[in-house]
Image (cartoon, rainbow, N blue to C red):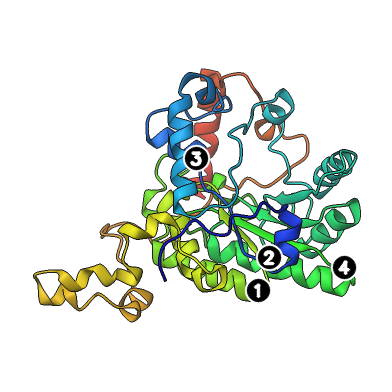
Amino acid sequence: MAPAGGPGAKRGILERLESGEVVVGDGSFLITLEKRGYVKAGLWTPEAVVEQPDAVRQLHMEFLRAGSNVMQTFTFSASEDNMESKYFEHAEEAMWAVEVLKELGKPVAATMCIGPDGDMHGVPPGECAVKLVKAGAAIVGVNCRFGPSTSLKTMKLMKEGLQAAGLKAHLMVQSLGFHTPDCGRGGFVDLPEYPFGLEPRVATRWDIQKYAREAYRLGVRYIGGCCGFEPYHIRAIAEELAPERGFLPPASEKHGSWGSGLDMHTKPWIRARARKEYWENLRIASGRPYNPSMSKPDAWGVTKGTAELMQQKEATTEQQLRELFEKQKFKSAQ
Protein backbone atom coordinates (compact mmCIF):
# COMPACT_ATOMS: atom_id res chain seq x y z
CA MET A 1 0.00 0.00 0.00
CA ALA A 2 1.61 3.24 -1.12
CA PRO A 3 1.65 6.31 1.11
CA ALA A 4 -0.92 8.87 0.17
CA GLY A 5 -2.69 11.89 1.52
CA GLY A 6 -6.07 10.20 1.81
CA PRO A 7 -9.45 11.15 0.40
CA GLY A 8 -9.60 14.76 -0.75
CA ALA A 9 -13.33 15.45 -0.35
CA LYS A 10 -14.19 17.75 2.55
CA ARG A 11 -16.75 16.16 4.84
CA GLY A 12 -17.88 16.90 8.37
CA ILE A 13 -16.81 14.72 11.28
CA LEU A 14 -20.27 13.21 11.75
CA GLU A 15 -20.52 12.41 8.06
CA ARG A 16 -17.17 10.64 8.24
CA LEU A 17 -18.03 8.69 11.38
CA GLU A 18 -21.51 7.73 10.20
CA SER A 19 -19.98 6.24 7.06
CA GLY A 20 -17.74 4.06 9.24
CA GLU A 21 -14.57 5.99 8.40
CA VAL A 22 -11.72 6.00 10.91
CA VAL A 23 -10.84 9.47 12.16
CA VAL A 24 -7.31 9.73 13.55
CA GLY A 25 -6.77 12.38 16.19
CA ASP A 26 -3.58 14.22 17.07
CA GLY A 27 -1.31 13.80 20.08
CA SER A 28 0.47 15.59 22.89
CA PHE A 29 1.22 19.31 22.83
CA LEU A 30 1.88 20.40 26.40
CA ILE A 31 4.27 17.60 27.39
CA THR A 32 5.87 17.35 23.94
CA LEU A 33 6.59 21.07 23.67
CA GLU A 34 7.89 21.12 27.26
CA LYS A 35 10.38 18.40 26.35
CA ARG A 36 11.43 20.42 23.32
CA GLY A 37 12.05 23.51 25.42
CA TYR A 38 9.16 25.69 24.25
CA VAL A 39 6.82 25.40 27.23
CA LYS A 40 7.20 25.75 30.98
CA ALA A 41 5.13 23.10 32.73
CA GLY A 42 2.20 24.71 34.47
CA LEU A 43 -1.16 26.29 33.87
CA TRP A 44 -0.11 28.92 31.34
CA THR A 45 1.17 26.67 28.58
CA PRO A 46 -0.70 28.25 25.62
CA GLU A 47 1.66 31.24 25.80
CA ALA A 48 3.78 29.18 23.41
CA VAL A 49 1.24 29.94 20.67
CA VAL A 50 2.22 33.61 20.96
CA GLU A 51 5.89 33.25 21.89
CA GLN A 52 6.84 30.27 19.72
CA PRO A 53 4.22 29.96 16.95
CA ASP A 54 6.65 28.18 14.61
CA ALA A 55 7.21 25.41 17.17
CA VAL A 56 3.47 24.89 17.59
CA ARG A 57 2.97 24.97 13.81
CA GLN A 58 5.77 22.45 13.31
CA LEU A 59 4.21 20.01 15.78
CA HIS A 60 0.86 20.35 14.04
CA MET A 61 2.56 19.57 10.73
CA GLU A 62 4.25 16.52 12.21
CA PHE A 63 0.95 15.12 13.47
CA LEU A 64 -0.65 15.85 10.11
CA ARG A 65 2.18 14.11 8.23
CA ALA A 66 1.90 11.15 10.62
CA GLY A 67 -1.72 10.62 9.65
CA SER A 68 -3.94 12.82 11.82
CA ASN A 69 -7.27 13.97 10.41
CA VAL A 70 -7.92 16.42 13.23
CA MET A 71 -5.67 19.23 14.44
CA GLN A 72 -6.77 20.61 17.79
CA THR A 73 -5.85 24.14 18.84
CA PHE A 74 -3.28 24.45 21.61
CA THR A 75 -5.55 26.27 24.06
CA PHE A 76 -5.34 24.01 27.11
CA SER A 77 -5.68 26.16 30.26
CA ALA A 78 -6.12 29.27 28.15
CA SER A 79 -9.07 30.54 30.16
CA GLU A 80 -9.47 31.57 33.78
CA ASP A 81 -12.25 29.03 34.27
CA ASN A 82 -9.98 26.23 33.11
CA MET A 83 -7.21 27.33 35.46
CA GLU A 84 -9.59 27.02 38.39
CA SER A 85 -10.88 23.59 37.40
CA LYS A 86 -9.33 20.52 35.80
CA TYR A 87 -12.46 20.34 33.47
CA PHE A 88 -14.26 17.27 33.03
CA GLU A 89 -13.42 14.94 35.90
CA HIS A 90 -17.10 15.30 36.81
CA ALA A 91 -20.01 14.19 34.62
CA GLU A 92 -22.14 17.13 35.72
CA GLU A 93 -19.58 19.68 34.49
CA ALA A 94 -19.30 17.93 31.15
CA MET A 95 -23.09 17.89 30.77
CA TRP A 96 -23.25 21.66 31.31
CA ALA A 97 -20.61 22.20 28.64
CA VAL A 98 -22.46 19.97 26.15
CA GLU A 99 -25.72 21.81 26.75
CA VAL A 100 -24.08 25.17 26.09
CA LEU A 101 -22.26 23.97 22.98
CA LYS A 102 -25.44 22.47 21.52
CA GLU A 103 -26.85 26.00 21.31
CA LEU A 104 -24.27 26.74 18.61
CA GLY A 105 -25.80 24.17 16.29
CA LYS A 106 -22.54 22.28 15.76
CA PRO A 107 -21.77 18.59 16.43
CA VAL A 108 -20.54 18.15 20.00
CA ALA A 109 -17.82 15.69 21.01
CA ALA A 110 -17.42 15.28 24.76
CA THR A 111 -14.61 13.32 26.37
CA MET A 112 -13.92 12.90 30.07
CA CYS A 113 -10.73 12.44 32.07
CA ILE A 114 -11.91 9.27 33.79
CA GLY A 115 -10.86 5.65 34.16
CA PRO A 116 -12.82 2.44 34.83
CA ASP A 117 -13.74 3.69 38.33
CA GLY A 118 -15.71 6.58 36.88
CA ASP A 119 -15.68 10.27 37.69
CA MET A 120 -14.54 11.92 40.91
CA HIS A 121 -17.98 11.47 42.45
CA GLY A 122 -18.09 7.79 41.60
CA VAL A 123 -20.40 8.03 38.59
CA PRO A 124 -19.59 4.90 36.53
CA PRO A 125 -18.29 5.32 32.94
CA GLY A 126 -21.44 3.86 31.43
CA GLU A 127 -23.61 6.34 33.30
CA CYS A 128 -21.28 9.20 32.34
CA ALA A 129 -21.70 8.28 28.67
CA VAL A 130 -25.48 8.15 29.01
CA LYS A 131 -25.57 11.58 30.68
CA LEU A 132 -23.42 13.11 27.92
CA VAL A 133 -25.54 11.68 25.10
CA LYS A 134 -28.78 12.76 26.77
CA ALA A 135 -27.29 16.24 27.11
CA GLY A 136 -26.75 16.30 23.34
CA ALA A 137 -23.26 14.93 22.61
CA ALA A 138 -22.95 13.06 19.31
CA ILE A 139 -19.47 11.74 20.12
CA VAL A 140 -18.43 10.56 23.60
CA GLY A 141 -15.36 8.98 25.12
CA VAL A 142 -12.26 9.55 27.22
CA ASN A 143 -9.03 11.47 26.94
CA CYS A 144 -5.89 11.87 29.06
CA ARG A 145 -5.18 10.67 32.64
CA PHE A 146 -4.88 6.94 31.73
CA GLY A 147 -2.84 4.76 29.36
CA PRO A 148 -3.98 2.76 26.33
CA SER A 149 -5.19 -0.45 27.96
CA THR A 150 -6.90 1.34 30.85
CA SER A 151 -8.61 3.82 28.52
CA LEU A 152 -9.97 0.98 26.41
CA LYS A 153 -11.44 -0.67 29.52
CA THR A 154 -13.25 2.58 30.22
CA MET A 155 -14.49 2.80 26.64
CA LYS A 156 -15.89 -0.72 26.90
CA LEU A 157 -17.85 0.30 29.99
CA MET A 158 -19.11 3.43 28.23
CA LYS A 159 -20.26 1.40 25.25
CA GLU A 160 -22.04 -1.11 27.47
CA GLY A 161 -23.78 1.70 29.35
CA LEU A 162 -25.07 3.23 26.14
CA GLN A 163 -26.28 -0.12 24.85
CA ALA A 164 -28.10 -0.86 28.11
CA ALA A 165 -29.85 2.52 27.88
CA GLY A 166 -30.77 2.01 24.23
CA LEU A 167 -28.70 5.01 23.15
CA LYS A 168 -26.33 5.44 20.24
CA ALA A 169 -23.28 7.68 19.87
CA HIS A 170 -19.95 7.65 18.13
CA LEU A 171 -17.04 6.62 20.34
CA MET A 172 -13.77 8.53 20.77
CA VAL A 173 -10.61 7.61 22.67
CA GLN A 174 -7.43 9.64 23.20
CA SER A 175 -5.29 7.87 25.79
CA LEU A 176 -1.98 8.83 27.31
CA GLY A 177 1.20 7.68 25.61
CA PHE A 178 2.23 6.19 28.98
CA HIS A 179 1.36 2.89 30.65
CA THR A 180 -0.61 3.44 33.86
CA PRO A 181 -1.80 0.09 35.28
CA ASP A 182 -1.05 1.26 38.83
CA CYS A 183 -3.18 4.42 38.70
CA GLY A 184 -6.23 5.02 40.83
CA ARG A 185 -9.19 7.25 40.06
CA GLY A 186 -7.03 10.36 39.69
CA GLY A 187 -4.93 8.88 36.89
CA PHE A 188 -1.30 9.66 36.12
CA VAL A 189 -1.25 12.99 37.96
CA ASP A 190 -1.11 10.96 41.20
CA LEU A 191 1.95 9.00 40.12
CA PRO A 192 5.15 10.06 41.90
CA GLU A 193 6.83 10.26 38.49
CA TYR A 194 4.40 12.92 37.22
CA PRO A 195 5.24 15.00 35.27
CA PHE A 196 9.04 14.87 34.84
CA GLY A 197 9.90 11.19 35.32
CA LEU A 198 7.40 9.43 33.09
CA GLU A 199 9.75 8.39 30.28
CA PRO A 200 10.15 4.76 31.45
CA ARG A 201 6.39 4.39 30.98
CA VAL A 202 6.31 5.57 27.35
CA ALA A 203 4.39 3.23 25.07
CA THR A 204 6.21 1.81 22.07
CA ARG A 205 4.90 2.21 18.55
CA TRP A 206 3.93 -1.46 18.68
CA ASP A 207 1.90 -0.89 21.85
CA ILE A 208 0.02 1.84 20.03
CA GLN A 209 -0.65 -0.34 17.00
CA LYS A 210 -2.25 -2.84 19.39
CA TYR A 211 -4.22 -0.02 21.04
CA ALA A 212 -5.51 1.15 17.66
CA ARG A 213 -6.57 -2.33 16.60
CA GLU A 214 -8.32 -3.06 19.91
CA ALA A 215 -10.08 0.30 19.82
CA TYR A 216 -11.29 -0.42 16.29
CA ARG A 217 -12.58 -3.86 17.28
CA LEU A 218 -14.43 -2.23 20.17
CA GLY A 219 -16.25 0.00 17.71
CA VAL A 220 -14.29 3.19 18.38
CA ARG A 221 -13.83 5.19 15.19
CA TYR A 222 -12.19 8.37 16.51
CA ILE A 223 -8.78 7.24 17.76
CA GLY A 224 -6.00 9.56 18.88
CA GLY A 225 -3.76 10.39 21.79
CA CYS A 226 -3.12 12.84 24.59
CA CYS A 227 -0.13 13.54 26.88
CA GLY A 228 2.96 11.60 25.81
CA PHE A 229 1.70 10.83 22.30
CA GLU A 230 4.45 11.76 19.85
CA PRO A 231 3.98 11.92 16.05
CA TYR A 232 5.41 8.41 15.65
CA HIS A 233 2.61 7.13 17.89
CA ILE A 234 0.04 8.74 15.60
CA ARG A 235 1.82 7.15 12.65
CA ALA A 236 1.43 3.78 14.38
CA ILE A 237 -2.35 4.28 14.55
CA ALA A 238 -2.46 5.32 10.89
CA GLU A 239 -0.36 2.34 9.80
CA GLU A 240 -2.32 -0.20 11.81
CA LEU A 241 -5.61 1.04 10.39
CA ALA A 242 -4.33 1.69 6.87
CA PRO A 243 -6.32 -1.27 5.47
CA GLU A 244 -9.52 0.27 6.80
CA ARG A 245 -8.59 3.83 5.76
CA GLY A 246 -7.30 2.78 2.35
CA PHE A 247 -4.02 4.69 2.50
CA LEU A 248 -0.84 5.21 4.48
CA PRO A 249 0.29 8.58 5.85
CA PRO A 250 3.17 10.47 4.20
CA ALA A 251 5.40 9.70 7.23
CA SER A 252 5.28 6.00 6.31
CA GLU A 253 7.55 6.69 3.35
CA LYS A 254 10.43 6.59 5.84
CA HIS A 255 9.19 3.72 7.97
CA GLY A 256 9.15 -0.01 7.28
CA SER A 257 6.05 -1.78 8.55
CA TRP A 258 6.74 -3.87 11.67
CA GLY A 259 10.48 -3.31 11.43
CA SER A 260 10.75 -4.52 7.84
CA GLY A 261 13.60 -2.09 7.17
CA LEU A 262 15.84 -4.18 9.41
CA ASP A 263 16.10 -6.87 6.72
CA MET A 264 19.01 -4.84 5.28
CA HIS A 265 21.00 -4.78 8.52
CA THR A 266 24.52 -6.21 8.47
CA LYS A 267 24.01 -8.32 11.63
CA PRO A 268 21.91 -11.47 11.14
CA TRP A 269 20.36 -11.43 14.63
CA ILE A 270 19.06 -7.93 13.96
CA ARG A 271 17.81 -8.93 10.49
CA ALA A 272 15.79 -11.63 12.26
CA ARG A 273 13.81 -8.86 14.01
CA ALA A 274 12.30 -7.66 10.73
CA ARG A 275 8.92 -9.28 11.39
CA LYS A 276 5.64 -8.55 13.10
CA GLU A 277 5.74 -11.57 15.41
CA TYR A 278 9.01 -10.42 16.99
CA TRP A 279 7.78 -6.94 17.96
CA GLU A 280 4.29 -8.11 18.96
CA ASN A 281 5.65 -10.63 21.46
CA LEU A 282 8.72 -8.82 22.76
CA ARG A 283 8.81 -8.39 26.55
CA ILE A 284 10.49 -5.00 26.82
CA ALA A 285 12.98 -4.41 29.64
CA SER A 286 13.28 -1.08 31.44
CA GLY A 287 17.04 -1.28 32.03
CA ARG A 288 16.54 -0.20 35.66
CA PRO A 289 17.48 -3.19 37.82
CA TYR A 290 16.60 -1.71 41.22
CA ASN A 291 13.32 -0.05 40.24
CA PRO A 292 9.86 -1.53 40.78
CA SER A 293 7.69 -2.25 37.77
CA MET A 294 4.89 -0.14 39.25
CA SER A 295 4.55 2.76 41.66
CA LYS A 296 2.30 3.57 44.57
CA PRO A 297 0.25 6.62 43.52
CA ASP A 298 0.07 9.61 45.84
CA ALA A 299 -3.70 9.30 45.78
CA TRP A 300 -5.00 11.25 48.73
CA GLY A 301 -8.56 10.67 47.62
CA VAL A 302 -11.20 13.28 47.06
CA THR A 303 -12.20 14.64 50.45
CA LYS A 304 -14.57 17.59 50.30
CA GLY A 305 -13.22 20.55 52.20
CA THR A 306 -9.68 19.25 52.74
CA ALA A 307 -7.37 22.24 52.38
CA GLU A 308 -4.44 20.55 50.63
CA LEU A 309 -6.74 19.21 47.90
CA MET A 310 -7.98 22.67 46.93
CA GLN A 311 -6.77 23.89 43.56
CA GLN A 312 -5.10 27.28 43.45
CA LYS A 313 -3.55 29.61 40.89
CA GLU A 314 -0.99 31.09 43.25
CA ALA A 315 2.45 29.54 43.67
CA THR A 316 2.74 27.17 46.62
CA THR A 317 4.38 28.83 49.61
CA GLU A 318 7.41 27.42 51.41
CA GLN A 319 5.24 26.72 54.45
CA GLN A 320 2.70 24.81 52.34
CA LEU A 321 5.50 22.78 50.75
CA ARG A 322 6.92 21.87 54.17
CA GLU A 323 3.48 20.72 55.32
CA LEU A 324 3.05 18.62 52.17
CA PHE A 325 6.51 17.07 52.57
CA GLU A 326 5.68 16.10 56.16
CA LYS A 327 2.41 14.50 55.09
CA GLN A 328 4.22 12.53 52.37
CA LYS A 329 6.83 11.31 54.85
CA PHE A 330 4.08 10.21 57.22
CA LYS A 331 2.23 8.36 54.43
CA SER A 332 5.46 6.64 53.31
CA ALA A 333 6.21 5.50 56.86
CA GLN A 334 2.82 3.86 57.28
First in sequence: mark 3 vs mark 4:
3
Along the line of sight, the residue nearer the viewer: 190 or 130: 130
First in sequence: mark 1 vs mark 2:
2
Image height check: is 83 above or below 184?
above
Along the line of sight, the residue nearer the viewer: 194 or 134: 134
Q: Quadrant of the N terminus?
A: bottom left
What secondary structure is marked by label 1?
helix
What secondary structure is marked by label 2?
helix
**Residue beneath label 4, please?**
167
Q: Amino acid at mark 1?
A: Leu
Pinpoint residue 205: horizontal percent, then vertical percent: 40, 62
First in sequence: mark 1 vs mark 4:
4
Q: Amino acid at mark 4?
A: Leu
- CA distance for labels 2 and 4: 15 Å
**Residue beneath label 1, please?**
218
Q: Amino acid at mark 3?
A: His
**Residue beneath label 2, please?**
155
- CA distance for labels 1 and 2: 8 Å
